[in-house]
Structures are given as C-alpha cells and as structure tokens.
Amino acid sequence: MELLQKKGTNIFFVNVYIVILQYKYIAMGITKTEHFTEEQNELAVLAKAIGHPARIAILQHLIKVNSCICGDIVNELPLAQPTVSQHLKELKNAGLIKGNFEGNAICYCLNEEGFDKIKAFFHQINNYLENKKNQCC
C-alpha cells in the first residue's frame, strides 16, 4: 500500500509539472508578441482597447462633452458603475483617455497622444487606398 501511495504521489506531481509546462510554453507562446515590432504591438493594444462597443460609446460621449466624471458616463450608458469603471480603466491603460482628480471624482477626457498612433496608422491605410484605386488582385 505504501508503495502505491508513493507511486500515486509521484504521478500526481508529474501531471502537475506537465500542466505547468504546458501553460508556460504553450499558452504563453501563442501570442508571440516578441516577433512583432513595438509599433505593431502598440497598435494591437489600442485596437483591443477600442474593440468593445461600450468603450466606443464612452469615447463618443467624451468627444461630445469634452470631459466628464464616471457618474456622468454611467448615466449615459446602460451599464452598471463597476462595468463602466472597468472600461474606463482599459481605455486609460491603453493611453486613450486620461483622468484627473476633481474632489472625490475623476474627470476623464481624451488623451491626444494615444490617438496620434491610431491617426498615423489610418493615414497609412488611407494613402494606400487612394493610390491603389481599387486595383486589387
């Protein structure tokens, strides 16, 4: 019985080790961000940040009102305050908005520097499309 318990324990630890290795080397290697340029990775982060309709609505609201606090955004969207706060966090982490404390609240507005990268990328696409004149394949 003692030998079976030892074997069972060893098998358990081997299985755990295999799962850890799979996570570390397979799951972590899927994105392979290190194979792309810094610009490509930055644009991907920005695209992911604006890739949700709630975040688009937040950006559109900030464009309309110039700046506002989280409570104002909550009143505009059909989302709970914690959900809006999470979307604001994602936009802020991506550098698309910035927030300043005004008393107990944070006042949010667009961060122009974050949008400069997006504008430059779409400018490249626009130039390509204008020069291509539908001469694809």
Image (cartoon, rainbow, N blue to C red):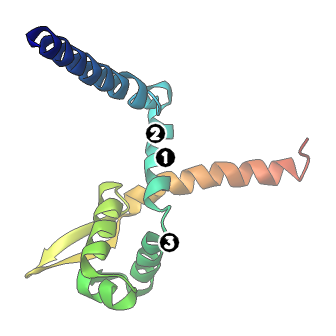
Question: For the point 58% across and 50% down, which residue is it?
Answer: 121
Q: Answer with mark 2 or mark 3, whichever residue precedes in sequence.
A: 2
Spot occupied by residue 114 in the image (x, y as percentages of width and height): 40, 57
Residue named by callout 2: 41
The amino acid type found where label 2 is placed reads: Asn
- Is label 2 or label 3 in front? 3
SS for callout 3: helix
Residue at coordinates 13% horizontally, 74% vertically from top-left? 101
Count how many numbered circles sit on residues in the image: 3
The Cα–Cα distance between marks 3 and 1, rounded to whole angstroms, is 17 Å
Kindly report which numbered mark, 3 or 1, lies closer to the viewer in this rendering: 3
Write the residue at 19% across / 11% down: 7
Whole-Å distance between the Cαs marked 2 and 1?
5 Å
Which mark identifies residue 53?
Answer: 3
Q: Are marks 2 and 1 in contact (CB under 8 Å)?
A: yes
Residue 68 disc label: none
- Picture coordinates of residue 22 (x, y %)? 37, 24
When asked about the image quadrant of residue 17, the answer is top left
Which residue matches tag 1? 44
- CB under 8 Å between callouts 3 and 1? no
In front of the other: 31 or 127: 31
The amino acid at mark 3 is Pro
The answer to whether residue 85 is left or right of residue 128 is left
Seen from this angle, which residue lies furthest top? 3
